[in-house]
Image (cartoon, rainbow, N blue to C red):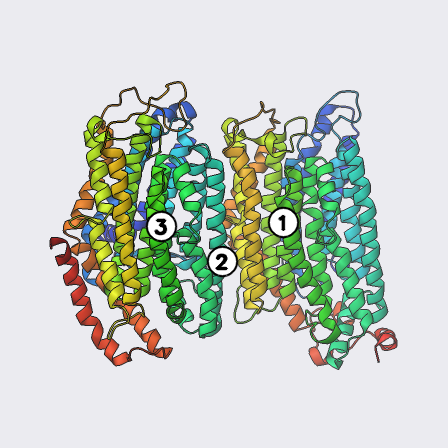
Amino acid sequence: MTTNINGLCPEIILVCGALVVMLMGLARRDAVRRATLGVAVASLILAFIAALRIGGIGTTAGWTLWPLATYDTLLTCGIGILTVLASAGMPFAFEPGNPDKHYRGEYFALLLTSLAGVSMIAKTTNLIWLFLALELVSIPTYVMVATGRSNAPAQEAGIKYFFLGALSAAIYLFGFSYLYGFAGSTSYAAIAAAYQSALLAGHLPYVAIIGLIMVVIGIAYKIAAAPLHYYAPDVYQGAATPVTAFLSFAPKAAGFFALIMVLNLTGWRLSGGAARAVPDLLMVLAVLTMFVGNVLALLQRNIKRIFAYSSISHSGYMLVGLAVGPFAAGNSPASGISATLFYLGGYSIMTVGAFAALIWLQGKSDAAEDLDDIAGIAGEHPFMAACMAICLFSLIGMPGTIGFLGKLFIVQSALASGHPVLAILVVVNAAIAAAYYLRIVGAMYIREPWSPFAVRNSATLKAGALIAAVLTIVLGIFPAFLFNQSNGSAEAVRNLVLNPVAPVATVKKPNTRPDLAAAQPHPLAVPAAAALARP
Amino acid sequence: MNFGQKDWIELIMNHLTLVIMLLIPLFGSLIVFATPREAAAKAAGPMALGFTILSALVGVTLLTRFNYGAGGVWQFAFKADWIPQFGVHFSLGVDAIGLWLLMLTLLITPAAILDSFHTIQTRHNEFYGWILLLFASTMGVFMAHDVLLFYLFFEFTLIPSFFMIGIWGHSERRRAAGKFFLYAFTGSVFLLASLVYLAWVHAEKFHSYSFTLSGLYQAGASLPAWQQGLVFTGLLIGFLIKVPLFPLHTWMPAAISESSTPASVMIAGFKLGGYGILRFALPLLPVAALKFTPWLAGLCVFSIIFGGLVSWVQRDMKKLVAYSIVSHLGLCILAFLALTTSGLIGGVLVMINSGILAAALLLVMGMIYRRYQTRSLHDVSGLARRLPALGFFAVFFAMATAAVPGLNGFVSEILSLVGTYVSGSAGHGGSLGPAYAVPAVFGMIAGALYMLYFVAKVIFGPLVEPVVDPDSQHEPHPAEPHPPRDLSLREWCVLTPLAVVVLFLGIYPAPVTRSMEAAMHKLESHAIAARVSAKIPGVSGVAAAHGILPLNKAAAGLASVAPLR
């Protein structure tokens, strides 16, 4: 998948960490089991450092976009640390002798494996690898949903999530097969070359469009885009809250990176004729997702369901960035890709922060899910309420937080690429969203308490929420680090699209870049494409 | 380079003053938030007052150091990069308009804080923390020279206001807080979209992103009329909700009547919406502003009359003030739209005076509420017999609101009306005229009606005092012993400074009006130029350019003479 094994260092660290955690989770002594959390955090930190150190590796290595891959890994490990901290104390009640209520190493092992998958997505150079990476993300999450809680709703959520997930995997795998049929190869370079020559020739075969549409729809499930969002509220509500926090990040990040990788193949230049269907589809998905998420969230009283719909709506904002693509007019600082990637980072931080605070406020029972359950909690627990409020205001998009900059960049990228209507729809949705987030803030601060609170007094959890809240504000005021990362990745995408690399030659000789005219489709690609080309 | 002690003083005095003014309450709010709850019950209020006064003292030095000759120039500028890729700077400064609105903020906030010593009985540290944050962000609005920075402060005011309305208030406070936030937030997202669009236009036309005011002025002026219209609509939605103007006003009566006295004082006293219209909407998009003027001015006139009449039939004292604000700010926006120097100056004066007077009246009503636990005009009467000092202040502020000559309300209303009247005639900017000014006069008449009604009902007449059941103490104002005593020393301290300023601005408004001339002159000629370039019939460019100066003098003359008549 990559020409350089060093590049896989972070994933290797994560998988090794997962194995160690798995073994430690089998230990007899509780102290060892309890240490699994520390090991998980340590391996994530190590992977983060590794990603930073190898950041510039092989920047010319053909189809691997190192800035994007580095951003992917940094984001995965950084947010991964937050999700691990938020998972402190899984499961919720400790009873010696009861295997259900025991510190369990496999939880963190699954989590790390899934994260390794997310981190690998942007390093793939081949559809097969992309499929494997996506499955590596998904399969552990099915288990996490089903085993995170031992009650019936969790089982139901697990089943639902698994079957629909498998269906979506089938859809995008089928789409991949079309792309293979179109290009005659599963390697990105060959497919991109096939697209390029077809686009240059002026007629793109339907198979290339249909395949792409199926891939987009399959992956839309991963990011919970409407109308493929139906599982999300039930699964979010049914799963244990730390698992929900993880679900709101990992599959979504994986989905967006995968979408970027797949759309890269087309050179982001699908316009005119039937090819328009793909950008149009993205745009329709974006608008639908924003509205469905926000409007349905208004009707909820269960906080986890609110968060589920809110995460749907945020997918909508990010899809806007994808729909407007990597080209922005003028010297716009943020193209659509850059805005989406920035938003993804910001969204992950504030959502996981909000979940960490929610887990803390939910107490040992993991049952407090209604707005009434956290009414007036700010009086007794001002610190965690403040962390939650900061994350919520950021999700609203109040200035001074990272959520504001995310929305700003999205709106700006939509305007700069000539889609003012999309920009207006984004701000309309931001206004709708304010209502339900404000309801949570209002419940915490303005209402009177109903019943005594039993919070989960965990320093780890507190640290997770605090880190997220502080990052929300600090990155909201000094966004340079995140902005440079996301913008650098978007630049890499743009450069790749503007100066595409030839299919076979560059993989072997990374330093030579034949120019646009020299790029020829893969030898196998020609007959297949010709056979399927529309008359 | 020799950077000596003198240069440091220079730097601090000239460039860091505004930053220091902002940092004091921000830092203060952190300390107040962090104060433990038990200690905060006693200490938070005085601490907040201390930080506010410290910041105000620094601010007052601006008055002595401001170069009034160059009132149109941004002074005490501070600039640092913030998001360089995006052309966003942390850029502060004040010109004459900002200076006086800043002073308004500095005047009202200490009074509100001093009043909350009586009023706020729970969760002290949070309340005073929020009040300091609201204070800081409001100052930031008037200081910001970068449009995105302005937006940041503008929007941030919602958070402290939301909590201040929602936590400490009357029974319907939660609904009022939510309504307030959602209205204002909805408006401001459109505002954001418009501003970002302008920045992008700047990037496309001038090849660099910019959010500075001057940059966006260029960008806005370069747009074709229909695009200006769209962007202008976005700005208007944001600002008119905040002003508020009919029909976007409904959050205001709820927010003011359901919140505690200090919160309502600060919401009523800070004029963010009007400032936004004057600073951004009108100059950024001159052609659209002219095109929209007839419709918008009609809305303003309606708002003036509607607000006055609704105010007249209110039975809730605080709602009476809320609707009077709707009426007054209608006049303010009308005067801005007139785009004549006297109208623009009059409009700013309306903002300042309406801010002071609404705050003062709300404080007086809070004092009545504290004694009788009622906001209804029907429950109390003849208070002048029981509380002569409070009665005096009530009558004084009511008279000023009703525009009695010699007090500040009169100056601003007369200037605005004259400005509207002459607008559109030969040699003046704008396109309004008597057709708008004459109906607006009814606003003044209505103002006299509702204020006299309030005074006659509550202050004069037979003494009627509701009996307060000491057990049923309403939040947030704890009842005082019965029969109530007249103003305490603290209440004197709250009201006296406001009364002094009311009198001063009524008798001698010339320093304020003169200092703003240059800035307004700039705006007016800008408007005339836009009108000429857009080929809107009615005035030729040459005549206009010649016509400005005499009017300018006339306005200044009027401003200094009018109250003495």
- Work out whether disc 1 and disc 2 sit on a shared chain: no
Distance Cα–Cα, label 3 vs label 2: 26 Å
- Chain ID, mark 1: A
User: Is B292 above or below relative to B325?
Assistant: below
The answer to which of marks 3 and 2 sits earlier in the sequence is 2
Q: Residue at x 82, y 62 (%)?
A: A176
Q: Residue at x 74, y 21 (%)?
A: A95
Where does the C terminus of chain B fall, quadrant-wise? bottom left
Say the numbered circle drawn on residue A295: 1
**Residue A197: percent from the left, percent from the top?**
76, 77
Most foreground residue, B195 or A142: B195
Badge 1 vs badge 2, beta-carbon distance below 8 Å: no
Q: Residue at x 39, y 38 (%)?
A: B257
Q: Residues within 10 Å of mark 2 (few under 14, many from 20)?
A: many
Viewer-nearest of discs 1 and 2: 1
The residue where tag 3 is placed is B307
**Residue B517: percent from the left, percent from the top?**
22, 63
User: Is A95 above or below relative to B310?
Assistant: above
